[in-house]
Every structure is written in C-alpha cells, then in structure tokens.
Image (cartoon, helix red, strand yellow):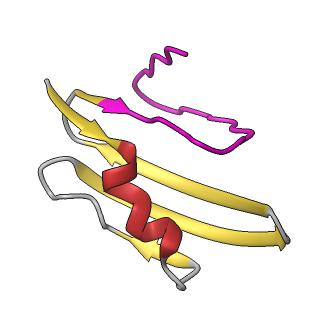
C-alpha cells in the first residue's frame, strides 16, 4: 500500500482560481474531480469525487478549523483523529 499526503495531492486544486478541476491526481492513484463554491468570506463548499484505483494510505493534517462531511458510495474509509 502506498502512502500519500492529501496536501500534496490537492494543494494546487485549493489554490487554483478555477472553480472546477478534473484529474489532478497522478494516474497510478486514480481520477478526481473538485468543484469549489464560495458561499461567503471564510466559507468554501468543496464537492469532490475521488475514484481511487487501488488501496492507498492517505494522510491529512489540517492547520485550520474545518467542518467536513464525507459520503462514500463505494469502498471504505477509516479515519483516525
């Protein structure tokens, strides 16, 4: 199983001026889609769709406060706080 850091995979997406970003993951991981909707200053709604092709370990460390809701339609995810 390969380990990736979420900040390395999506930092360019979050900093991009585009509101819709497709397939920025390396091809060996899978495909991704991100749609950013700015609700108001300080509030960003980010709709993402990840199609991961193989099991991976994805580590995410966040510096700022966030409220995250994840809905997984296929596969499984384990979160460790």
Residue at (55, 16) in percent of width and height:
81
x, y percentage for residue 72? 54, 32
32 on left or right of 61: left
Residue at (25, 39) in percent of width and height:
4
Seen in the picture, residue 22 relative to 45 is either above or below; the reply is below
Question: Which segment is the magenta one?
Answer: 58-81
Seen in the picture, residue 76 relative to 44 is either above or below; the reply is above
x, y percentage for residue 76? 43, 21
Q: Looking at the image, which is closer to me, 59 or 28?
A: 59
Q: Residue furthest bottom?
A: 17
Q: Looking at the image, which is closer to me, 8 or 37?
A: 8
Q: Quadrant of the N terminus?
A: top left
x, y percentage for residue 19? 58, 79
Does residue 60 belong to the magenta stretch? yes
User: Which secondary structure type mostly characterizes the magenta part of the structure?
Assistant: loop
Q: Looking at the image, which is closer to me, 7 or 63?
A: 63
2 on left or right of 44: left
x, y percentage for residue 29? 20, 47
Location of residue 43 by image quarter: bottom right
Give the mark count: 0
54 on left or right of 73: left
Residue at (76, 72) in percent of width and height:
38
Does residue 61 belong to the magenta stretch? yes
């Amino acid at each position: 199983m390969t380990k990736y850091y979420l900040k390395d995979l999506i930092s360019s997406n979050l900093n991009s001026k585009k509101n819709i970003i497709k397939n920025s993951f390396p091809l060996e991981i899978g495909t991704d889609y991100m749609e950013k909707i700015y609700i108001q200053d300080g509030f960003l709604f980010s709709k993402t769709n990840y199609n991961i092709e193989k099991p991976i370990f994805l580590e995410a460390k966040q510096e700022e406060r966030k409220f995250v809701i994840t809905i997984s339609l296929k596969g499984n995810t384990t979160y460790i706080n």
